[in-house]
Image (cartoon, helix red, strand yellow):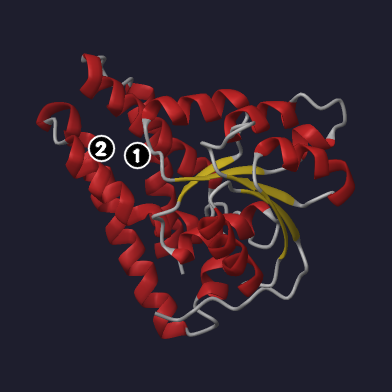
Amino acid sequence: MASATKIPHRKKILLAEDDPANRKAIENLLQTWGWEVDACTNGEELLGKLSIVQPDLVLTDVHMPVMSGIQLTRAIRDLPEAKGQQLPVIAFTSDDTLSTRDALKAAGITAILLKSDPEDTIVAVLEQHLGLRPSPAVGNSFSGLTAYTEGDAAFESELRQLFCNNLEELMGTARQVSDTRDFEGFRYVQHKCKTTLAILADPQSIQAVEDFRLAMDKLEKDGTSIPSGVRQSLLTHCQSLIDGLQSV
């Protein structure tokens, strides 16, 4: 797989991570991609630096002493300045439980990344929210994909087909999961599609898939039916991406 081109822009990221080893590893990764990093040990420390450092993005662990990532996100959104509402705050966590995701969303998190996600996915999501990767609409040239493949037309064509296959598989499992109750099967396919969706950088599609997963989790937990509108949103957005990928 071709590696993405390192970013020349000196975007500034404020990082909150309490574990020293994880903090150093994440800091090194971000610096490798050309970003300036100011690392903090908890949410309270980061909040104190916010007005001084003026970052382009906040990347935070969730479970930390003193102030958690959820508390930090809520505190940033409560800031009187417009910056508090506009600043991208991304959770970077090992906790993929429904309760944590719900709490992060309620606090105003911008996006959620898992520490187990592939590096390509992590970088693509950060690029998107740093304004370095365009969010494609149906019918455009998917320039983010072109940048990812570094102008290699054959590689881009191959990836387009693979991405279409992934999205079609996701649509198929979404249609059937209410009847089959194959919840792990959907999660497996969703995981396969994470890099696809991150590279295509279409936030509406990413949100539609996440909304479906949350509804599916409720079906698994207490039998609540998946709303037809939630399912249709996923199908519509995935089909739109497929149409766009096949149009060139």
Give the camera-side residue of 128 and 90: 90
Disc number placed over residue 82 in the picture, else none: none
Q: Is residue 146 above or below residue 17?
A: below
Q: Which residue occupies 89% across, 47% down?
A: 52
Residue type at the position of mark 2: Ala
Relative side of 39 to 26, left or right: right
Give the camera-side residue of 92 and 127: 92
Quarter-of-image position of residue 142: bottom right
Q: In the rendering, at what x and y percent does residue 15 appear?
A: 66, 51
Q: Which residue occupies 33% across, 68% down?
A: 161
Q: Badge 2: how crowded within 10 Å, few (<14), some, or many (20+)? A: many
Q: In the rendering, at what x and y percent does residue 165 appear?
A: 27, 60
Instruction: Specify the quadrant that holds the N terminus.
Output: bottom left
Contact, mark 1 vs mark 2 (Cβ under 8 Å) = yes
Q: Secondary structure at mark 2?
A: helix
Quarter-of-image position of residue 159: bottom left
Report the residue marked by disc 2: 174
Residue type at the position of mark 1: Leu
Give the camera-side residue of 155 and 211: 211
